[in-house]
Image (cartoon, coloured by chain):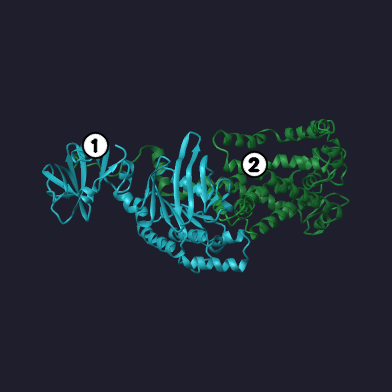
């Protein structure tokens, strides 16, 4: 027994701050609403609203003579979008996005696997630094740096010369489609720069997915007679798949929309991003630009749908 | 009798840490062998050496007469039941159980049937379509067992398989494992830190400490005649009588073990040995009273049947025991 009967509840905190705390404690959802309202409004009105406006624009058409927008609903712009030259642009972009995604996944997996399974302490720090560091410097600087690296007089050519492998580079550049005068003006160059720039976005999700795979599952597979290749195919890959899909969403959609890399490194043929830029800028054809932007949205939607059907998100 | 697993002076060092240090053991085919010890004693590393997850830094391992060094886990006819089961979360229970057969190229229909039989054997028939996440701990344990046994291993390794289960379930699984082992005739190597589990299930026990085997023998022998102070402490709770008391009892040894239940608080009968002391503490343990008697500074615990009266604290008592119950030990 204590000599003094102490109150069970502490006295109320004084001042407006104390009263505010009590008020929010009694109405927990109010605080959540106050915190979430601005970003939700931003997303809902500014972002989704402009997206909707864009979508709407694509159903208008442009008057060929006056260059003015004709505000009547029509599918004429989409007919224009499906013309041969424009389909060519779409196909080129989608193929590039697909190869970039595939190559990123193949390159990223071993790096992510090492980081998730073996790297510890300072090696893990080094891994994160190595992956993130390129993201800290300017995007334009990196691309121009690559233009110099890939140029005919660049360091890559010099390396090939020193290694007496010029014949290999020349043979590659002589190939149709992927070749060109030099790497910096070929699709190969565009591809290399895309892979370099988007690689971190592939590595990090795969690493996160692999980190969550318990090590004893690998041992269990091996114990049950699974060779390393089988363990990869039946255990590791399915469990890493959500990470690979998450990463591929980044690499795929970023490649689909980018208009700077193909403009600086690559041939003069257009990608979707460049087409949008040209149509809404110099050409002043906002409806066609809008129709072009609908393409990546539709492709990504279809991609996610297929990925979901294939069970890519089952392990989430 | 065929030797299932042979360790010849096997060591596994991790840098300066000697996880396993010069272990010799020979496990017979069809034996239920337990490796008992506290965490970090090297018992799990020994199991991993048998499974092939670790390679020895010294010594020689044979599994059914074949050299095991350099043989990867997937080429050993040894299967493991992992401590936390390690079921594949993305596969159904049936696919989990059939995994070993699948990677070995057994046909779909055949492996489905084998997996269903294995599930029936561990009393989970019809659970094949579920996912590991939908099962309780005890059920996952059974699936892990079925997944290992479906491969018909020559040696089944169990790494603290019952550690995560509650007491009732654990006792039930102990009985089931024991009868399963009897009916299948497969060699079981069982790692545990629970001495009761090891004593009740195993044919033979190896008690590990600091990477070495302290004692290897039948459960009764290890329990009744601990060779070292560590075994006396870890397996049950034998009294360790110091050299001074041994000498008084006419025994030439650095120390001796004496089980609490072998001692009576009574005057010695014919041929029995006795010591006198005072009651230092007592507590009620259900079936017995634990009475601690102070004999010239050495504390001797006595398990006295609960039916008998407990002497008062501080009162002088005589404790007596049969001479056969006093076992000399190797260390002080």
- Alpha-carbon span between mark 2 and mark 1: 62 Å
Name the image quarter holding residue A136: top right
Q: Which residue is mark 2?
A: A111
Q: At which x and y percent is residue B205? A: 38, 51
> What's the colour of chain B in the image?
cyan
- Front-most of residues A192 and B115: B115
Q: Which residue is mark 1?
A: B243
The C terminus of chain B is located in which quarter? top left
Is A203 left, or right, of B63 in this rendering? right
Q: Is residue B93 above or below residue B10?
A: below
Q: At which x and y percent is residue B22? A: 45, 40
Q: Which chain is green?
A: A
Decide if residue A88 is in sight here.
Answer: yes
Q: Secondary structure at mark 2?
A: helix
Decide if residue A316 is in sight here.
Answer: no
Is A253 left, or right, of B121 in this rendering? right
Is A262 left, or right, of A40 in this rendering? right
Task: Check disc 1: other Cα within 10 Å, few if <14, some if 14-19, many if 20+.
Answer: some
Tell which subunit mark 1 falls on. B
């Amino acid at each position: 027994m204590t000599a003094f009967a102490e109150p069970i509840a502490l006295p109320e905190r004084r001042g407006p701050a104390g009263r505010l705390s009590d008020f929010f404690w009694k109405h927990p959802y109010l605080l959540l609403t106050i915190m979430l309202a601005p970003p939700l409004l931003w997303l809902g009105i500014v972002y989704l609203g402009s997206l909707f406006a864009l979508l709407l624009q694509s159903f208008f058409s442009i008057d060929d003579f006056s260059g003015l927008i004709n505000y009547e609903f029509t599918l004429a712009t989409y007919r224009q979008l499906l013309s041969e030259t424009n389909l060519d642009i779409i196909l080129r972009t989608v193929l590039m996005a697909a190869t970039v995604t595939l190559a990123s996944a193949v390159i990223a997996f071993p790096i992510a696997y090492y980081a998730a399974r073996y790297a510890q302490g300072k090696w893990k720090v080094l891994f994160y630094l190595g992956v993130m560091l390129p993201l800290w410097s300017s995007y334009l600087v990196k691309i121009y740096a690559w233009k110099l690296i890939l140029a005919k007089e660049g360091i890559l050519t010099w390396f090939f010369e020193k290694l007496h492998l010029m014949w290999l580079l020349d043979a590659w550049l002589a190939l149709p489609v992927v070749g060109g005068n030099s790497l910096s003006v070929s699709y190969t160059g565009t591809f290399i720069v895309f892979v370099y720039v988007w690689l971190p976005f592939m590595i990090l999700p795969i690493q996160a997915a692999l980190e969550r795979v318990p090590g004893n599952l690998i041992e269990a597979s091996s114990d049950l007679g699974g060779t390393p290749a089988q363990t990869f195919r039946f255990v590791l890959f399915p469990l890493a798949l959500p990470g690979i899909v998450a990463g591929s969403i980044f690499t795929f959609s970023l490649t689909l929309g980018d208009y700077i890399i193909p403009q600086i490194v690559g041939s003069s043929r257009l990608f979707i991003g460049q087409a949008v830029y040209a149509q809404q800028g110099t050409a002043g054809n906002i409806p066609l630009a809008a129709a072009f932007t609908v393409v990546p949205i539709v492709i990504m939607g279809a991609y996610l749908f297929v990925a979901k059907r294939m069970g890519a998100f089952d392990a989430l | 009798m065929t030797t299932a697993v042979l360790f010849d002076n096997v060591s596994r060092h991790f840098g300066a840490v000697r996880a396993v240090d010069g272990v010799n053991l020979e496990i017979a085919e069809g034996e239920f062998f337990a490796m008992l010890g506290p965490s970090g004693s090297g018992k799990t590393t020994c199991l991993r050496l048998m499974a092939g997850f670790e390679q020895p830094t010294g010594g020689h391992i044979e599994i059914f007469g074949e050299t095991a060094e350099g043989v990867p886990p997937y080429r050993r006819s040894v299967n493991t039941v992992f401590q936390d089961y390690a079921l594949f979360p993305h596969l159904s229970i049936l696919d989990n159980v059939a995994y070993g057969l699948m990677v070995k190229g057994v046909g779909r229909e055949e492996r489905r049937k084998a997996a269903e039989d294995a599930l029936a054997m561990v009393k989970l028939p019809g659970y094949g379509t579920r996912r590991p996440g939908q099962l309780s701990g005890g059920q996952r344990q059974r699936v892990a067992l079925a997944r290992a046994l479906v491969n018909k291993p020559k040696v089944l390794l169990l790494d603290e398989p019952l550690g995560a289960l509650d007491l009732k379930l654990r006792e039930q699984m102990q009985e089931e494992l024991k009868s399963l082992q009897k009916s299948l005739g497969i060699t079981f190597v069982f790692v545990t830190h629970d001495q009761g589990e090891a004593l009740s299930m195993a044919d033979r026990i190896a008690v590990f400490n600091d990477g070495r085997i302290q004692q290897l023998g039948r459960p009764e022998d290890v329990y009744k005649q601990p060779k070292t102070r560590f075994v006396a402490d870890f397996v049950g709770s034998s009294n360790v009588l110091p050299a001074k008391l041994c000498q008084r009892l006419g025994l030439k040894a650095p120390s001796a073990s004496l089980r609490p239940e072998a001692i009576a608080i009574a005057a010695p009968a014919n041929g029995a040995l006795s010591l006198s002391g005072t009651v230092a503490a007592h507590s009620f343990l259900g079936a017995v009273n634990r009475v601690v008697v102070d004999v010239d500074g050495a504390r001797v615990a006595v398990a006295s049947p609960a039916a008998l009266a407990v002497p008062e604290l501080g009162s002088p008592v005589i404790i007596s025991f049969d001479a056969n119950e006093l076992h000399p030990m190797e260390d002080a």
